[in-house]
Amino acid sequence: MLENKNNIKNKDSKFWELDKILISHTVIDYNSFGRNQSKNDTEFVRLHFGLQGSYHFNYRQLKNSFQLYGHHNNIMYSNGLDIEVENKSKRIETFGINFTAESFIEIGQNGNELLKRFTNKVVNKQDCILSNQWKTNSFKIQQVIKEIINCPYQQDLRNLFLLSKSIELLVLQADLYSDEREPVFIKKSIDKKRIIEAKELLTSTIEKPPTIVELSKLVGINEYKLKKGFKELFGTTIFGYVHKNRMNLAQKLLLDTKKSAKEIAYEIGFSSPQHFSAAFKKEYGVTPNTIRENPDSIIK
């Protein structure tokens, strides 16, 4: 790949290579705002997920450009890649799954009508994008991406896990884009941007998140639109998002550190170890100490 590195301060990339699938997670820190060009001659169906940052994205094979920010996703196909990215923020984080055309066709032809239409274009080697309107990553999509990035398996099980999760992301995207309902609460791009900002604030303050009143003031949107718009964009309530993230973090800390359940309870924002234990058992079906002693004991 040819890439202009003059404007890049630091680039951290992680790759997982499977048979006919390439998965990548990239975080780029820029020195300043500017344009960077990338080229290669690969033929891939590209599942693209933006996780952080704002940028102008020009895709020459598709003869189209997009203004993207925050959490977004789409599916694109081209024989060769020639893109120009103009960063509008100092950090951009992306995640991608590249299927060879042959492997994608085998999967996509068994999908819903939307995916079948897209797959037919791939069969005919027609450069294409699933939709010109990029969708916001649902909560479930974000969770599957995290599972891939933190893949706990090795060797053959690792490859099987990554393959299953790659197909799961494709299914989630196909389902997301098949919903053609017009947004009810979030019709303006500025409101969408503010709600994505609210989600980022919740993620960064998971141990002590702001109240809905505080959050609405921080991002400049009224409480009603914030609550309704958050559910519309991410498929979960603000409380549900905070709770699920706390549980996921608790599970990771229990398995990857030697911190006690009591320490973890306070670290992730619970008022007492008893409340944490009850919430954890309700979420996973086992107590925090049980999962530490037997990591395979989670029932959901």
Image (cartoon, helix red, strand yellow):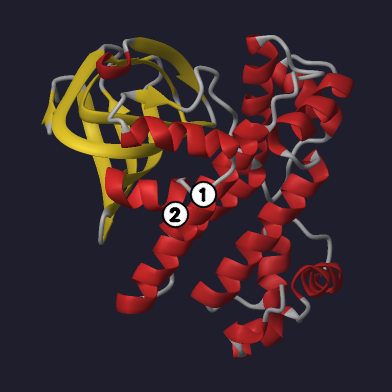
**Residue holding disc 2:** 166
Q: Residue at x 82, y 35 (%)?
A: 211
**The C terminus lies in which quarter of the figure?**
bottom right
Mark 2 crowdedness (10 Å alpha carbons): few <14, some 14-19, many ≥20:
many
Res 223 quadrant in image: top right
**Residue holding disc 1:** 169
Q: Residue at x 69, y 76 (%)?
A: 261
Extreme residue toward the left, this view: 2
Front one among 231 and 62? 62
- Which SS class for mark 2? helix
Instruction: Tell me whether the residue at label 1 lies in contact with that at label 2, contact meaning CB atoms closer than 8 angstroms.
Output: yes
Q: Is residue 191 left or right of residue 100?
A: right
Front one among 132 and 248? 132
| Mark pair 1, 2: CA separation | 5 Å
Image height of 119 relative to 169, above or below: above
The x, y position of residue 13, in whole percent, is: 27, 45
The x, y position of residue 26, in whole percent, is: 32, 41
